[in-house]
Image (cartoon, helix red, strand yellow):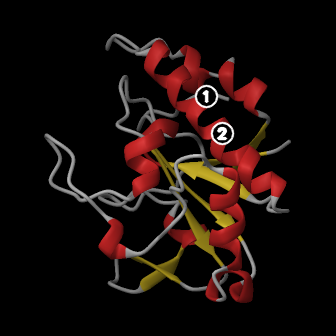
Amino acid sequence: MKFNEEGLLPPKDYELTLSELRVSILVKGSQNENPWDMKWRLFLVNQLEIMAEQLWAVGINQIYIDGSFVEDKAHPNDIDGYFECELMDLASGELERKLNALDPYKVWTWDSSSRKPYRGFTKKQLPMWHRYRVELYPHFGQPSGIRDEHGNQQQFPAAFRKTRDSYLPKGIVKIIQ
């Protein structure tokens, strides 16, 4: 795995365990001129591991990560991602209840009223971001709120496989056990 000339992973899904992720270019760095923040990136992976283990414990195995973490950026702010789940598990609140039973900080919510500001950032963040610096969104076939270059709503799979500003195709990482 290596970055292309745009600083992106070439388009495809890269299946990695968390151990493989820790020794990949995404943590260890590339040969770019910017100082690579390997310590911070490793911290983010360790935080992701906590959340992935909780998802696996409730039977969710389709977990994808994206954002600046999977780009040739020395210091990403966080890890963004999504996971596939059943609509009824989410709509009933059962998924959130099960996940929060596992998480000591009860961060699993996607309620916009739970978003809070963080110093130096304009965007309000979910509790999971404040605690882990990871945001994982449920996907069951719904629009993501992210629009494509034509203004159309995209589902997470499509939205996460293009850059948001230039709409260039890019690769993402599927976290496997």
Give the total of numbered labels. Answer: 2
Q: Is residue 154 left or right of residue 17?
A: left
Q: Is residue 87 left or right of residue 170?
A: right
Which amino acid is tagged 2?
Ile
Residue at numbered disc 1: 46
Are dots 2 and 1 in contact, CB under 8 Å? yes
Q: Is residue 84 left or right of residue 114?
A: right
Image point (73%, 55%), residue name: 55
Image point (38%, 33%), residue name: 76
| Residue 128, horizontal then vertical, whole percent | 47, 52
Q: Is residue 58 above or below residue 129?
A: below
Packing grade of label 1 (10 A; few <14, some 14-19, many >=20) is some
| Residue 84, horizontal then vertical, whole percent | 71, 69
User: Which image quadrant: the C terminus?
Assistant: top right
Can residue 79 be seen in the rendering of this structure? yes
| Residue 125, horizontal then vertical, whole percent | 32, 56
Residue at numbered disc 2: 50
Seen from the viewer's position, the closer of residues 147 and 78 is 78
